[in-house]
Image (cartoon, grey):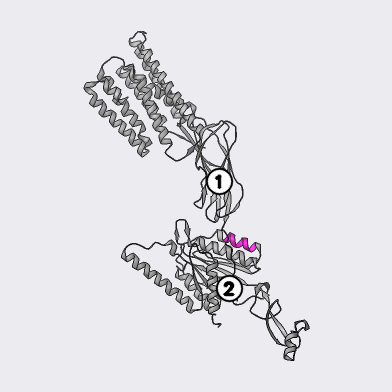
Amino acid sequence: MTRIASPRLAAYAGLAAIGLIVGLAAGRVELVALAAPFALAAVAGATLARDPAIEATLELDRERALESEGVEARLELLSPPGSDRVDVLLPLPDELRSRSSNPRAVVLAPGAPRTLSVPIRCERWGAFVVGPLLVRARDRLGFHSWEARIGGRAPLRVYPSVETLRALLPPLETQVFIGDQVSRAKGDGIEFADVREWEPGDRVRRVNWRASARRGSLWVNEQHPERNTDVVLFLDTFADVRSAGRGTLDLTVRAATSLAHRYLQRKDRVGLVSFGGYLSWLLPASGTRQLYRIIDSLLQMDIVLSFATKGVDILPPRTLPPKALVLALTPLLDPRSAAALLDLRARGFDLVVIEVSPMPFIEPGKDELAQLSYRLWRLSRESLRARYEQAGVPVIEWLDGVPLNVPLEEVAAFRRQARPARA
Amino acid sequence: MLAYAAARVPPFAALVAAIGVFGALLLVFVLVRHADDLLPWALAVLAVAYAVSLFVHGSAVDEGAPLVAAGLLLCGELAAWSLDERHAIAAERDVVLRRGLALGALVLAGLGAAVAVIAFAASPAGGGLAWTALGAVAAVLVVGTVAELVRRTA
C-alpha cells in the first residue's frame, strides 16, 4: 500500500519547533506551552503510524444479468493489525449503479475479516469488468493514509432486455430448409394452398376426392411447405444520439436482441452485420449458440468515429445469403449506411428499414437559425425516406417508448399494400 | 481565544484583533476552498496574534496559555477533520466515534503538556545560565526528536 503523510504532521512539527525556539529566545514560557500540544500531536501522529496491510477480495453473486436487474458485490476486507478507518470505493462504470453507499468508511478489527455488500443495479447492457477496489486506510487522527487498488476484478455481462414480439416479419422468399415459416411456394406441407389437376407422379393420398367428384376428373391438393428463413440484422453503428442516459444505439441493440431471440426461436438462421466505424459480422446460423454469439457481439458494440468510406462490398459474400431478409436498424444519420442500404436493395435483397428515430433525443435550438436548420434537417430525412420508398423499401420510424411490435406491424401493412418489383 | 488575546491588551486590541481576524479569515478560506496546505499558516497567524498580545502585555506569565494552546490545537484538528470529510463518504458511527475520542484525548493530553510547562516554569527551581543552557538543550532535543519522527514517517 502507498503511504501518504498528511502535511499537517510536518506543519505541527514546524509550529512546535518555532514555538520552542522563539519561546526560548524571548524567554516566554507561554510560547513553549503553546508549542507543547503541537509537539505532542506530531509525536503521537508519527508513532501511531502502522501499515494496515489490508487484503481484499471481490466477488459478484453472478456473472450474467439482464438490464434493470440487480447484482450483489461482496467485498471481504481483512487487516491483520486493524484499522480505525478504511474508505472503500467500488469503482463502477456509468452503466452500473450502486444502490447503497459507495464509497463507505468502515472500521476493521485486528485480524477479523469484514464482509461488505454492495447491491448494484444494471442500468444498461454491456460487458463490464468490476473492480479492483480503491481502498484508503487512515490512522485514528488522520495523520497518515495508505492507498491501494486491491481485490481483483470480476467480469459482468449485462444482457439487453428482450421485448415480447407478437409477430415477426415474414420474408418475401424462404430458404430450402425445414422451418416454421409457411412458404409462399407450393409443395409438401401442412397449410392448404390450392387444388390442381392430377399429374402422373402425384400420390393418391393427395387426391381431393370432393373436388374430383364435382369436376369429373382427378384433382389433388397443394400445400405450402414450412421452410426456414435467413434473416440478417443490419445495424448502423456509425452514429449514436444520446440524451438522459438513453440513445439510439441502446434501442438498436435491444431491438436486435429481441428480433434475434424470436427468429431463432422459430428455427430461422440469423446473421448480424454491424456496419459502422468498426465493421463486424456473424454468418447466419441457427440455434441457442448463435443467440449467445449474437448477444456477445452486441455487448461489444460501440460507436467508433470513422471517416472511411465503406460500402457493402467489404462484407464477406456469405454474410448476406441470397433471399435473406435484411432487417436494417438505423437512425438514418450517416450517408454511408444510407447508401449501403440502397445498394443492398439494388442487389435484390429483401430489405426492411426500421428507422430508430433520433428525434426524442434531440432538442431543437431556441433561436430562429437553429429552428430553421432543424426543419431543414428533418426535410432532408424525409427526402431520404422517400428515396427508400421509391426503391420499394419500407421505412418505418420507431420512436423511443413505442413497442417494437408497432413498426413491425407497420412494415407488414406496407408489404400488404405494395410488393417490391422483382428484377 | 482571539477575544481573550485582544482583551488582555486593550490599547493594542485593534492590532491583535486585526491579526487574529486575518488568521480566522484564512481558516475560513481553507475550509471553504479545501486548501489543506494553508491550514498551518492559518494556525500560525492565530498563534502570532496571541504572541503579540503576550509581548505587548508585559513579562507576567499568562496562566491561560495552556487553554489557548489546547484551543489552537483543537481548532487545527477540527479543521483537518472537516477537510478529511469533504468527500461524500458514508462513515459508520464507530468511525466517527473513534476519531472524536482520539481527538478529545489528544487535546486533553496537549492541555496537560502545556499546563506542565507552565507549572515547571512557575516552580522555584532557580535560574541562571545553567538552567538556560539546560532549557536550550531540552528544546533542541525536543525539536530534533519530533523532526526525526516526522521525517521517518513522512
In the image, residue A393 sits, relative to residue A359, either above or below, namely below
* Residue at the right extreme, as displayed: A204
x and y percentages locating residue A6 in the rendered image: 43, 33
Q: Nearer the viewer, residue A390 or B15?
A: A390
x and y percentages locating residue A358 in the rendered image: 45, 64
Q: Which residues are magenta?
A: A289-297
Residue A119: mark: 1
Q: Nearer the viewer, residue B9 or B94?
A: B94
Q: Measuring 38% from the left and 26% from the top, which residue is drawn there?
A: B73
Given the image, on which type of amino acid does mark 1 rest?
Answer: Pro
Chain letter of disc 2 in the image: A
Residue at numbered disc 2: A325
Give the alpha-carbon distance from disc 2 to disc 1, as whole Å: 42 Å
Q: Is residue B31 left or right of residue A160?
A: left
Asked whether residue A292 is drawn in magenta, I would say yes
Q: Quadrant of the C terminus of chain A?
A: bottom right
Closer to us: mark 2 or mark 1?
1
x and y percentages locating residue A110 in the rendered image: 57, 30
Q: Quadrant of residue B14?
A: top left
Asked whether residue A13 is drawn in magenta, I would say no
Chain letter of disc 1 in the image: A
